[in-house]
Amino acid sequence: MNHAKGPLLSIDVSERETTTQSVADERASFVGGRGLCTKLAHDRIPFDADPFGPENRIYFSTGPLQQSEMSFTGRMNCTGLSPLTDGLLSTNAGGYLSRNFVGTGHSAVEIVGEADELLVIHVTDDGVEFVEAPELSGATVPEVTEYVNRERGLDAENVLCIGPAGENLVRFACVMTYESRAFGRGGMGAVLGSKNVKAVTFEGDAAPEVDLPEDVQREVHSAAATSDDLMRRQGTTGGTEMINDNFSLPTRYFEKYHFEDADKIGGNAVEEKKYKKGSCSMCAFACKLPTRDEDTGLETEGPEFETVFSFGSNCEVGDLVDVMKSNELCDIYGMDTISCGNAVAAYLAAEDEFGNATLVHETVEKIATREGIGDLLAEGVSRAAADLGVRNYTVKNMEFAAHDGRVLYGQGLSYAVANRGGDHMYSTTLRVEYNGEVDPETLEGKPEIVVHRENHAAFRDSGIVCAFAGGTDHVTEETLERLFECDYADLQDVGARTVELERHFNNKRGMDREADTLPYDLPGIEAALDEYYERRGWNADGTVDDSVIREYAVADD
Amino acid sequence: MDVEVRCYGEVAAVVGETAVSLALDADATVGNVVTELAVGERAFSGGLVVMVNGRHAETSDGLADGDTVALSQAPMRE
């Protein structure tokens, strides 16, 4: 099976020392990206670690496809112990960083410890340099990018960094790259902030060779370049009105299922503001959304569908420019738009201020700086809900994405069991329910689907293939078999082992079936949980035996 | 009978309208709507999604007076 190449680079910021070590067996077993990082994180982060402690470790990695010239591969993975979910969590970002990361010659980079000064770390194919940068304290994401350009002559595509939110340990702070692309969910920006690391740059010409079949790469690239998919014009917002009319677009902090102004913030409205094409590294599909409002001069990238929900319908804000501004503020300060939008919506519910866009924008800034009410909201909805007097719409402390588990029952089950909680990307079961491949309003047959799609997603994030290539559209199961030169069942197995390692780590931190709980009733959920655990071969209390994990030990263990 | 058809995204682009009212025979099916609007031959991203009154429907499903038919490409590509 094809897999990432190169050693693990470990960076201890306490000692300002680096080591490299072979992870050949881990790469062979877990491919790269999320799988490789999950294996390393599971084995190297103490089960009782404090997410903000020096013992937590944050990993960055690519897969073998980041050494290709194929569309849908401009992505990277980030993994660590999440300060939001308190469990092992992976998140990935697009942009252009992945090829520069590969150029340093490493398959994964690990950062551990806690620096005594705010640092910028430069990783090249020739070594690692630590630069003290106290002047960057409080700097926004664009200011960090400008600094790196000024001081090192590097571009936005060489940089990952945090904004003020990461420094202030906002539990849903992102690691940002290319200014607007986010390792979005779960607060990995706050983990980097806790280590006093403001930015890491990657530059080099030492990419290891990976022998990937060229004919497959050409086929995928050609399909991406010639596709007339609506996503190429409207990103993920193209389904907004259809979902609002026929399923649910959560509104007024989940109080309502439909938003009467959806057409004002949906796909057509976003496309009207789009002023150029936007892409990720090597991708001809180009589904990104650089937008500009000519009246105000506001420019941002997006909003994508999730932000249309979180800062639009869920805050009852029906003006696209207001949603664009929320999106831009999150990018500048380095925060996840889904969690941040939900936190703001919860606050609007508490204050009965739905639709107050000015208050929304003020609150976003207060969260990033932990000023006033922002200090409470920066803890995330789950930790703030009781004080606010609102219902806690999260799973494992992770705020929900737009796709409403109350009408998409399989997606609801997915939120419940996902090791990172209310995140739609963990299985994207939503897709087959929206499409009508299965009845959305039943849990019958859904455990099998969720298991399959979780495994697929975990492998996809290890390869790494963009989720928008689809499970059946541009990168099919057969395409994956040809790219990785193995059976699809082997890829499913990599995904299953990755999910299982996450689960085992979380079990060791006290999470079991009780954590697999939704804040609303779904008919048949207990039976579905039983079946899900049984299909995974787990215990009925949602735990994984140590003996199962020992089977995943590799030669280095 | 009269039915309301709501067209989304790629389907709206083909039909040229986001909403169409159709007068159909009493025994009309979803397939008749698809044929009437000439969307059956097109390949939509992720396939054509058809819903009647908020529930997924097959082309062979019958319609009733006052029904609302939704036609769309797959709304999410993830």
Image (cartoon, coloured by chain):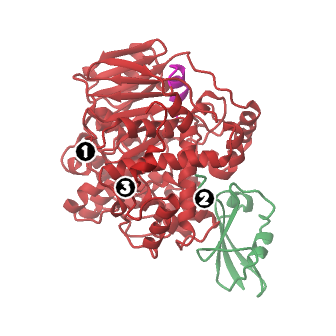
- Residue A303 in view (yes/no): no
Q: Pointer 2 indicates a residue of which chain?
A: B
Q: Under tag 3, what secondary structure?
A: strand
Q: Quickly name the residue at label 3.
A: A399
The chain whose colour is green is B
Which residue is rendered at x = 60% and y = 62% of the image?
A: A432
The chain whose colour is red is A
Q: Given the image, on which type of amino acid does mark 3 rest?
A: Glu
Residue A214 is situated, as x and y percent measured from the top left of the image, at: 74, 30
Task: Judge from the rendering whether residue A419 lies leftward or rightward of residue A279; answer left or right.
Answer: left
Q: Marks 1 and 2: which is nearer the front? A: 2
Task: Judge from the rendering whether residue A434 lies leftward or rightward of residue A314; answer left or right.
Answer: right
Q: Pointer 1 indicates a residue of which chain?
A: A
Residue B12 is situated, as x and y percent measured from the top left of the image, at: 68, 61
Q: Nearer the viewer, residue A470 or B27?
A: A470
Residue A420 is situated, as x and y percent measured from the top left of the image, at: 40, 51
Mark 3, other Cα within 10 Å: few <14 / some 14–19 / many ≥20 = many
Q: Nearer the viewer, residue A135 or A461?
A: A461
Would you place residue A422 above or below residue B32 in this image?
above
Quadrant containing the N terminus of chain A is: top right
Q: Marks 2 and 3: which is nearer the front? A: 3
Q: Are marks 1 and 2 in contact (CB under 8 Å)?
A: no
Quadrant containing the C terminus of chain A is: top left
Q: Is residue A263 magenta?
A: no
Task: Judge from the rendering whether residue A267 lies leftward or rightward of residue B47; answer left or right.
Answer: left
Highlighted range, magenta: A94-106
- Residue A215's tag is none
- Residue A366's tag is 1
Q: Quickly name the residue at label 2.
A: B75
Q: CA distance from mark 3 to mark 1?
A: 19 Å
